[in-house]
């Protein structure tokens, strides 16, 4: 069966990565979480004091990009790949609220996007990948054979994120998370470089009132039909 590129874009906390990872496992494809890549760069910026008092020193961060290496390393026990930043497993650190506060601002920096888009395109040369993010179907792989655009209301997405953070032991309020979701939506959609938007040939998928299993079954069945026609 011919391998294709599957691009999944959409707003934060729409479950893009969860669906993408499950779909990749079912197809025997490689899953690439581009959000983890931008989160890792944001963590690097925080650790090197390029972000302080809500001020982002974008020039210093861009100048330091050559010092950054990003790798997805498979974890057989967890059945997934984890993000390594300069040889260190940072999977837990990049999922914190501190990183979430700044990741959209870091992702809006042209130099950062240029570096990571090039890495992402290199990862897709052999096809057989499921990649999720904000600009996969519009910029990274505009010719992807299958494009999905995930959406849900800010309140539903904030509630999902809030539960995740509580499960990880973070001390946050729902109002903080909702405010962060709305701020990220605005920044992602209004940034000058590669703004979040639905590709003209993408299928919009509102999963606000849909369980994970139902989402996966519908998307998986549709994907198989697309692959069969290629």
Image (cartoon, rainbow, N blue to C red):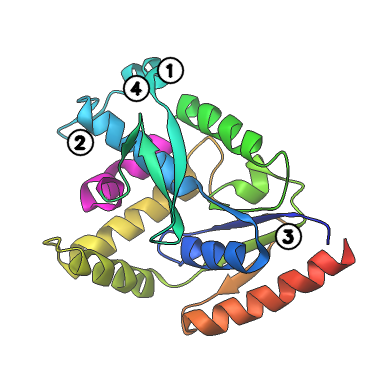
Q: Which residue is mark 1?
A: 66
Residue 156: x and y in percent read 37, 75
Residue 4 visible in the current orientation: yes
Q: Earlier in the sequence, mark 3 or mark 4?
A: 4
Q: Which residue is mark 4?
A: 61
Residue at 11% across, 61% down: 171
Image disc number at residue 54:
2
Q: Nearer the viewer, mark 2 or mark 3?
A: 3
Q: Nearer the viewer, residue 133 or 175?
A: 133
Relative to 104, 18 lies left or right: right
Residue 108 visible in the current orientation: no
Q: Which residue is mark 3?
A: 146
Q: Identify the secondary structure beneath mark 2.
A: loop
- The part of the chain drawn in magenta is 93-108
Q: Earlier in the sequence, mark 1 or mark 2?
A: 2
Relative to 180, 138 lies left or right: right
Residue farthest to the front, as pictured: 76
Pointers 2 and 3 in contact (C-beta within 8 Å): no
Residue 139: x and y in percent read 65, 41
């Amino acid at each position: 069966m011919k391998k294709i590129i599957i691009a999944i874009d959409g707003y934060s906390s729409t479950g893009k990565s969860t669906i993408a990872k499950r779909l990749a496992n079912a197809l025997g494809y490689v899953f690439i979480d581009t959000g983890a890549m931008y989160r890792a760069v944001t963590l690097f910026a925080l650790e090197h004091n390029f972000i302080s008092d809500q001020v982002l020193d974008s020039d210093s961060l861009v100048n330091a990009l050559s010092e950054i290496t990003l790798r997805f390393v498979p974890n057989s026990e967890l059945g997934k790949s984890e993000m390594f930043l300069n040889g260190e497993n940072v999977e837990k650190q990049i999922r914190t609220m501190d990183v979430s506060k700044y990741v959209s601002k870091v992702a809006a920096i042209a130099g950062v996007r240029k570096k990571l888009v090039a890495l992402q395109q290199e990862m897709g040369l052999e096809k057989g990948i499921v990649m999720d993010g904000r600009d996969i179907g519009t910029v990274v792989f505009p010719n992807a054979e299958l494009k999905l655009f995930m959406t849900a209301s800010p309140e539903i997405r904030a509630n999902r994120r809030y539960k995740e953070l509580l499960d990880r032991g973070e001390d946050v309020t729902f109002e903080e998370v909702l405010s962060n979701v709305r701020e990220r939506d605005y920044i992602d959609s209004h940034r000058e470089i590669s703004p979040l938007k639905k590709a003209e040939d993408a299928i919009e998928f509102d999963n606000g009132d849909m369980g994970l299993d139902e989402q996966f079954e519908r998307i998986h069945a549709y994907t198989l039909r697309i692959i069969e026609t290629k």
